Image (spheres, rainbow, N blue to C red):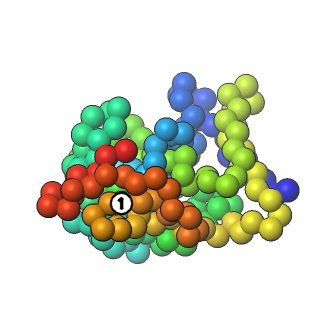
Amino acid sequence: MKEFSLPLMSEYARPVIKLYGMPSLIDTGAVVPVFSVYPYFLEKTFAAKMILPRGNISGFGGKEYGSVYSLKNFKVGELIFETLEVFVPDEPDIKFRFLLSATLFHGMDYEIDTINQKFTVRMNDEQNFNREFKIKDLEGKLFPQIDGVLFEDVDIELQDYQIFF
């Protein structure tokens, strides 16, 4: 069994780790990752390219307008997402720059340990630390896809790119 741990940021009551020097929320209820940063940062840091130009995403936090970007080589501890597709709101949230969805850790055992203030990810020895997370458009529906495995659809209306999860 392979594993790695990252410290939780103790000043937050929710599970937050630091990635690229910024607070990053682990959201076990989210289906797609949401990155509240400016596109310029993504383009320069992760060679990001816009793949869906305009849409809105709805969740418990309300509705956000933005775009979907494809990033290269995003790291979470020892995990490397060679391709990572994320929703980027038009107006970035200043509190949590990266919202990491549960689907990013599909097929792994992950633990949020608030007693010892750490986030631990475990995987079988035969699993690869390199992963791909894509958002696939199949006949007007979006599907999160991790390493080739499709998940439940995320409704989208193509005329105005509405994404719901």
Residue 67 sits above or below residue 26 on the image: below
* Residue drawn at point x = 40 percent, y = 67 percent: 136
How many badges with numbers are in the image? 1
Badge 1: residue crowd in 10 Å (few <14, some 14–19, many ≥20) = many
Residue 134 sits above or below residue 3 on the image: below
Query: Could you say where residue 25 lies in the image, as x and y percent from the top left?
Result: 50, 41
Query: Could you say where residue 105 lies in the image, as x and y percent from the top left?
Result: 61, 52
Query: Could you say where residue 141 lies in the image, as x and y percent from the top left?
Result: 32, 60
Point out the residue furthest to the left here: 159
Mark 1 secondary-structure assignment: strand
Q: Quadrant for the N terminus, please.
A: bottom right
Query: Could you say where residue 79 lies in the image, as x and y percent from the top left?
Result: 64, 61
* Residue drawn at point x = 24 percent, y = 40 percent: 63
Residue 99 sits above or below residue 126 on the image: above
In this view, the residue in front, 157 or 118, is 157
* Residue drawn at point x = 58 percent, y = 68 percent: 147
Q: Is residue 24 left or right of residue 109?
A: left
Q: Quadrant for the C terminus, please.
A: top left
In this view, the residue in front, 54 or 75, is 54
Would you identify the image quadrant in which residue 93 lies? top left
Report whether residue 59 is seen: yes
Q: Amino acid at mark 1?
A: Leu
Residue 113 sits above or below residue 94 on the image: above
Would you identify the image quadrant in which residue 117 lies? top right
Q: Is residue 53 left or right of residue 69?
A: left
Report whether residue 54 is seen: no
Point out the residue furthest to the front here: 139
* Residue drawn at point x = 36 percent, y = 60 percent: 142
In this view, the residue in front, 131 or 78, is 131
**Residue assigned mark 1:** 142
